Amino acid sequence: MKEVMSNSLYFGISVTLLGYFAGLFLSRKLKLKILNPMLVSIVLTIITLFTFDIKYSDYIQSGKYISYLLTPATVCLAIPLYEKIDLLKKNLKAIIAGIMAGVFTSLFSVLALSILFSLPHEIYASILPKSITTAIGIAVSEEIGGMQVITVAVIIATGIFGNVAGEGICRLLRIRNPISVGLSFGTAAHALGTSKALEIGEAEGAVSGLSIAISGFITAILAPMFVNFL
């Protein structure tokens, strides 16, 4: 059984998708935000690999093909962006200022926490691009000497947290303006946050999608500078 799974071209994809659909079902059925489909998929995949004693390297041989869809999925966020282009143009200065504030907050918070907990330089470099989309974050991490595995894990954790808790935090802080909400999700929780922003409203989703692209670009420029601070 183990050998069949390890050598199957469909095992990784099947486990990942089944876990995601299970999470989607539980999320809709139980109405619990913590049951994020991606989080449930990750947990179920890990349990499956441990149960059948399957190496990650065997799983990823077929599971990696899902990652190829990441870039086109991110590009699809341009659709709500195009539909709300007039709104974005009208508030362009505020949007740019908000994105800059979000990027600097992310970079400085990582620096402060790394100093506080005396993290090694390699770990610091790995978590520095935590708030940008995976496709850009991996490239940034590789450039500044981080470990891609840690970078991916941190980016996913950040996105899931933003997706699950972002709306509640905005309500707690009384952030109701669609532009502000979209900026919060896009600059702090990348694509996973944007998926939540799209659920809240079209304007929020459009601003969040724009934030992903611009914050990723700015982070790619600033991260090589910040990595030398520690």
Image (cartoon, rainbow, N blue to C red):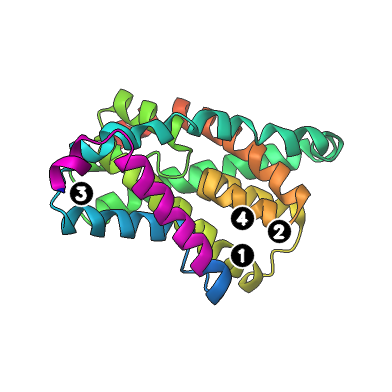
Label number found at residue 200: 2
Rendered position, 129 above or below 30: above
The amino acid at mark 4 is Lys
Measured in 3D between alpha carbons, the distance from the residue under mark 4 to the one under mark 1, in whole angstroms, is 8 Å
Residue 217: image location, x then y, percent: 53, 28
Amino acid at the residue labelled 3: Leu
Q: Which residue is mark 3?
A: 119
Q: Nearer the viewer, mark 2 or mark 3?
A: 2
Assess whether mark 2 and mark 4 are in contact (beta carbons under 8 angstroms): yes
Q: Earlier in the sequence, mark 3 or mark 1?
A: 3
Nearer to us in this view, 97 or 143: 143
Check if mark 3's residue and mark 1's residue have beta carbons within 8 Å.
Answer: no
SS at circle 3? loop
Q: Which residues are magenta?
A: 2-26
Q: Nearer the viewer, residue 3 or 147?
A: 3
What residue is disc 4 on? 196
Q: Crowdedness of circle 1 by 10 Å Cα count: few (<14), some, many (20+)?
A: some
Question: What distance separates the C-alpha of mark 2 from that of mark 3?
Answer: 37 Å
Q: Quadrant of residue 173?
A: bottom right
Question: Which residue is at a point 52% across and 33% down the rendered structure image?
Answer: 216
Do the numbered discs 4 and 1 sit on residues whose CB atoms are within 8 Å? yes
Q: Amino acid at mark 2?
A: Ile
